[in-house]
Image: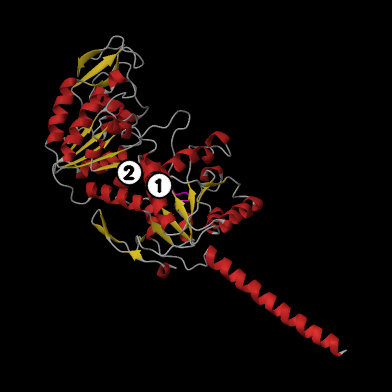
Amino acid sequence: MAGSFIVRSTLLVVIGIIWDMNKIQTLAKNAVLKGKRVLLRVDWNMPLHEVPTEGDLLKVERSAETIKWLKKQGAVTIVATHLGRPKGHEHNLSTVQLLPYAEGYLGDPIMYCGEDLETEEGLIEIKQAIQSAKNGSVLLLENVRFYQGEETNDKKLAGRYASLADIYINDAFASCHRKHTSVHAIAKLLPHYAGPELVNEISSASKLLEKPKKPFVALIGGAKLSTKLPVLSALLKKADLVLIGGAMAHPFLKAKRIQIGKSYLEEGSVKLAAQLVKNKKIILPQDFVVGKSLKSNSGLRRADLKEVKANEMIGDIGPKTMQEWSKIIKSAQTILWNGPVGAAEVTAFSHGSMVLGYAIASRARGKAFGMVGGGDTIPLAIATGMDDWFDYISTAGGALLEFIATGGKIPGIIALLEKQPKVKTATAKKKASSVKKKVVKQKSSVAKKKTGKLSKRK
């Protein structure tokens, strides 16, 4: 099957391992795809309980470019994504809600196939819709997580997806850390390729890992240390300095016996922090903006490192820390920013993240490489009004962190490195079926003629 396309060959360097794109293949811009059924895995997961932000829609905007290219090549594009964490078929998490946004960026209508893929009737209806679709058409499937087999990497479910298409393209880097059917198992059954956005994500993240320009500074924020401990351990081996802010700094402060008042503290996180706190590469805030609540502006004040009162909560880094960390950033040649350094959803506690965002963008505009990643970080990067200055804004959160922590060895990428399967594709099966029917008709016709001749003889 791979021979049917023009496959682009390039090199990806990750943790000293050269990944030849003959192993992790991508389709060239002039690939012959006319009439081919392409199963495109994207990540359009976003909060729909409120109006999606510009940051939320960035995933859709980027995927639209891939879909436009597939349309231009004459492919029938079958789009698959997850949405939220449903427990079964939950109407409020149906992908039908994504149609207005996807159609808006695409500029063309999308056919919606909301039938149940796990039922024979549903599978037949989806296949009929695909077979009747004209070249250049785009179809959107129902939420992949509506099916029990998705999160268990089920081979039977993968087979159902494979029966719809000729080739599989993974353009969902944000989902690649999940060993799920639509990310991992499906690649064993169809000729598989990395999409343009997936390649962009890998190429950018690799610059943090393979001989990054020095000094390399990582700014890590957010709430839970447990989810970022592996990436912190990996970054401490690569980066020159790791600036830790937000609630993630709290267990480190407690490990140093510094009081944090009523501030949020993840259970069991102090023991985790104690493993790293003595590392000289870790830089913690030296002052804070505190208040009696993170929901209001009452009682706001600046507090030095050891001046947080028992009835106060840390909401942001203080001006002294903002100034010191900005200086560090201005001397960096490689910068990673993941996570806010305060409760940035509240304006009063967003200033630290914004100041550092300005500093990173300004530095990235020059010779330094500046990368932003994580759902909570993207809106802040955009809010600076300088988002074009960052070298790359990753739409991935957990996947980016796991990519860094494992040196790129995440399920979705590993699946794309596997050998191309030798299979009959949906189009090939359709042609074979058509030929078989013609042969049967011809035989039937011959038989009738012979029967007719014999009956006349009688």
Which percent across, then down, holds residue 304?
A: 18, 17
Q: Give the left or right position of residue 105, taking residue 364 as reference.
A: right
- Relative depth, front residue between 442 and 293: 442
Which percent across, then down, holds residue 297?
A: 31, 12
| Residue density around tag 1, few if under 14, some if 14–19, many if 20 or more, within 10 Å | some
Label 2: state its secondary structure.
helix
Q: Give the left or right position of residue 448, taking residue 330 as reference.
A: right
In the image, residue 176 lies in the stretch drawn in magenta:
yes
Q: Residue 457: which quarter of the image? A: bottom right
Q: Which residue is mark 2?
A: 400
- Relative depth, front residue between 180 and 165: 165
The chief SS type of the magenta part is loop
Q: Magenta segment range?
A: 175-182
State which quarter of the image contains the C terminus: bottom right
Residue at x-position 31% and y-position 48%: 201
Q: Give the left or right position of residue 449, taking residue 353 as reference.
A: right
Please say which color scheme the image uses: secondary structure
State which quarter of the image contains the N terminus: bottom left
Q: Residue furthest bottom?
A: 457
- Relative depth, front residue between 184 and 108: 108
Does residue 176 show up?
no
Label 1: state its secondary structure.
helix
Does residue 218 show up?
yes
* Circle 1: residue type: Ala
Residue at x-position 63% and y-position 52%: 125
Query: Considering only vertical position in the picture, is 251 above or below 133?
Result: above
Q: Which residue is mark 1?
A: 64
The Cα atoms of the two marked residues, 2 and 1, are separated by 21 Å
